[in-house]
């Protein structure tokens, strides 16, 4: 889901990293960490996912719906419910 949100920002990786460092107040966020998040090699903190959604101007539940439509399946019900609750 993080990769979908990252793509929705329309930012180059370096620009996205700079925005996330600012949004998360995390000056030590490195390019390798961002790459690992985008590839799915490292767990993405919820705060980073939500910040990326804010940067992209998209709601997290819309990312889940987009992914579900692409996979032609239903999103994980518990995750979808959590995201709806967060942004209700």
Image (cartoon, helix red, strand yellow):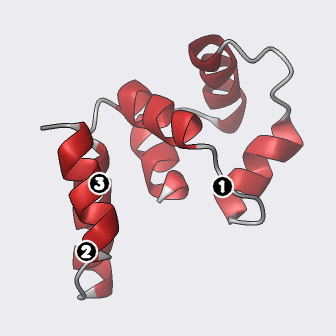
- Residue 59 x/y as whole percent: 25, 40
- Between 14 and 65, the residue placed more toward the observer is 65
**Mark 2 closeness class: few <14, some 14–19, many ≥20 residues within 10 Å:** few
Query: Closer to the camera: disc 2 or disc 1?
Result: 2
| Residue at image location 25% in from the left, 63% down from the top | 80
Q: Earlier in the sequence, mark 3 or mark 1?
A: 1
Pointer 3 and pointer 1: residues touching (CB < 8 Å)?
no
Total labels: the figure holds 3
| Residue at image location 83% in from the left, 37% down from the top | 31
**Mark 1 closeness class: few <14, some 14–19, many ≥20 residues within 10 Å:** many
The residues tagged by marks 3 and 1 sit, at their Cα atoms, a distance apart of: 22 Å
Residue 10 visible: no
- Residue 82 x/y as whole percent: 29, 54
Q: Quadrant of residue 78?
A: bottom left
Find disc 3 in the rendering and name its residue: 82
Q: Quadrant of residue 16?
A: top right
Q: Earlier in the sequence, mark 2 or mark 1?
A: 1
Residue extending farthest bottom: 72
State the mark number for residue 38: 1
**Which element is circle 2 on?**
helix
Q: Earlier in the sequence, mark 3 or mark 2?
A: 2
The residues tagged by marks 2 and 1 sit, at their Cα atoms, a distance apart of: 23 Å
**Which element is circle 3 on?**
helix
The residues tagged by marks 3 and 2 sit, at their Cα atoms, a distance apart of: 9 Å
Quarter of the image where the C terminus is located? top left
- Residue 5 x/y as whole percent: 44, 47
Find disc 2 in the rendering and name its residue: 77
- Between 85 and 24, the residue placed more toward the observer is 85
- Between 58 and 81, the residue placed more toward the observer is 81
Residue 75 visible: yes
Query: Closer to the camera: disc 3 or disc 1?
Result: 3
């Amino acid at each position: 889901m993080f990769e979908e949100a990252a793509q929705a920002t329309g930012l180059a990786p370096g620009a996205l990293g700079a925005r996330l460092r600012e949004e998360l107040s995390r000056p030590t966020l490195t390019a390798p960490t961002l790459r690992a998040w985008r590839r799915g090699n490292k767990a993405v903190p919820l705060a980073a996912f939500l910040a990326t959604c804010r940067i992209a101007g998209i709601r997290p539940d819309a990312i889940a719906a987009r992914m579900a439509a692409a996979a032609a399946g239903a999103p994980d019900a518990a995750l979808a419910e959590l995201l709806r609750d967060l942004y209700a």
